[in-house]
Image (cartoon, rainbow, N blue to C red):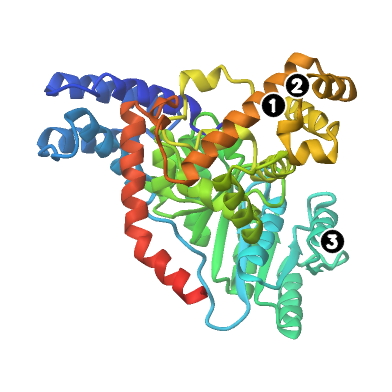
Amino acid sequence: MAFENLSERIQKALRNLTGKGKISEDDINSASREIRLALLEADVNFKVVKDFIKKIKQEALGKEVQESLNPGQQVIKIVNDELTKMMGESAVSLNKSKHIPTIIMMVGLQGTGKTTTVGKLANRLMQKEKARPLLIAGDIYRPAAVDQLEQIGDQLKVPVYSEKNQKDVAQIVQDGLRQADKNKNDYVIIDTAGRLEIDEPLMAELERVKKVAQPDNILLVVDAMTGQAATDVAKGFDSRLDITGVILTKLDGDTRGGAALSIRAVTGKPIIYTGQGEKLTDLEQFYPDRMASRILGMGDMLTLIEKAQQDYDAKKAEEVAEKMKENTFDFNDFVDQIEQVEKMGPLDQLMKMIPGMANNPQLKNVNFDKKQIVYVKAIISSMTKEERENPELLNPSRRRRIAAGSGRPVVEVNRMIKQFKQARDMMSKITKGNFKGMDNLPGMNSPMGRMAMRHMGKKFKKNKKKRMKVKRYHS
């Protein structure tokens, strides 16, 4: 999980400040020292760390405490704001051409996942904008690179332009652009060759491709797991090609996060997307403010909601919400919800997007074993149609039959049914606006949890008018 070690260290440093009525300069210095060590261990650029700590101290010692926050929470807010600034403050979109096609040139070293990222970006543009992209196979050196891109194209049903006998990459790109004009494609994504390290022949070739393609976007694909070395790579490519943005891949495998925290500050170029998985759907817009919230254990509810909206059928979601409200949610709905959540990603990562839950000690002891979901599905599959629709029918003899049919112990069947009923009752209360007992959830009553909920409340309030306008427009 990205930033896991850094997140734990920073939260530990700030935990000592929360709840204090007054914070001394020694308290600030002590917390700053811990945060500095945490950032350096996360492989963040030394100069970036130095500037970051200097700003925190200046802000923390020179700012009046807001009435709504205690001194400890004020420091958390300052750290959150500075982390967000370090990563770029706001999300950055692709540059769009006034006339189609918008041309995107992908560059980077070997092994960063560049070709797969070409497919992920094409898929994202198709899903978000109903785009009709054309992919150009410009990596003629890596064995099977063209074949890999063509396989991705087949998978996405996206055309791929290639010339396997052509050795001039600039010519391939020029011919591919003619094809895009002919097909009226609105996006062209150019896959280019990489090397194990930056060298003159590679950069000269990329400069020729840039001259021919005149791209609207030059996106550098960087492996997040390379840490601070990623910033050196970014500087090298930027100095020759003037890149427009960065895509960080393998962010899910980097527990440190140094690349994400350093690149914008060192190069001045934004991180536009992050890759956090191997599937062609695993490409996300990068939001600095949301990432800062995750690092500080304040969750990321907006991304969680967007994931849900992306994978959920709106009509079905309304039906389920009504069933929850009326407390008629049954086992068929339960299985459907499990499958919907599985599409959104690993459950442990989703849980950490909930305010107060990230790095929660109780959460660490929870076993998110995929086998448990398989067992639950097996138990439900062993029920009759009537039993799935009416859980009240499940008497002891029926439960013994279900246990035998699913190959699970009776005690496990009983536990699952009990948990289902408890969850159904709680969901019914929440949908009716009854939040009694929510404060007892792990992490919600912690300083980080309370501040996260206040933080999220402001964001939702800020966007309320906009959402209402959209709702009225569609009605």
Q: Residues within 10 Å of mark 3 (few under 14, many from 20)?
A: few
Q: Is residue 456 left or right of residue 94?
A: left
Q: Residues within 10 Å of mark 2 (few under 14, many from 20)?
A: some
Would you identify the image quadrant in which residue 73 lies?
top left
The percent position of residue 277, horizontal first and vertical second, equals: 66, 42
Q: CA distance from mark 1 to mark 3?
A: 44 Å
Q: Would you place residue 404 above or below residue 317 in this image?
A: above
The percent position of residue 349, horizontal first and vertical second, equals: 57, 34
The percent position of residue 387, horizontal first and vertical second, equals: 79, 35
Q: Is residue 62 visible?
A: yes
Q: CA distance from mark 3 to mark 2?
A: 44 Å
Return the mark for residue 14. none
Give yes or no for contact between labels 1 and 3 (Cβ–Cβ under 8 Å). Answer: no
Amino acid at dot 3:
Asp
Residue with the mark numbered 2: 413
Amino acid at dot 2:
Val
Q: CA distance from mark 1 to mark 2?
A: 6 Å
Q: Secondary structure at mark 3?
A: helix
Query: What residue is at 66 percent from the left and 56 percent from the top?
Result: 316
Residue with the mark numbered 1: 417
**Disc 1 versus disc 3: nearer the observer:** 1
Return the mark for residue 154. 3
Query: What residue is at 58 percent from the left and 29 percent from the top?
Result: 422
Q: Is residue 231 visible?
A: no
Q: Would you place residue 269 above or below residue 215 in this image?
A: above
Would you identify the image quadrant in which residue 193 lies?
bottom right
Q: Secondary structure at mark 1?
A: helix
Q: Residues within 10 Å of mark 1 (few under 14, many from 20)?
A: some
Q: Secondary structure at mark 2?
A: helix
Q: Is residue 368 left or right of residue 256?
A: right
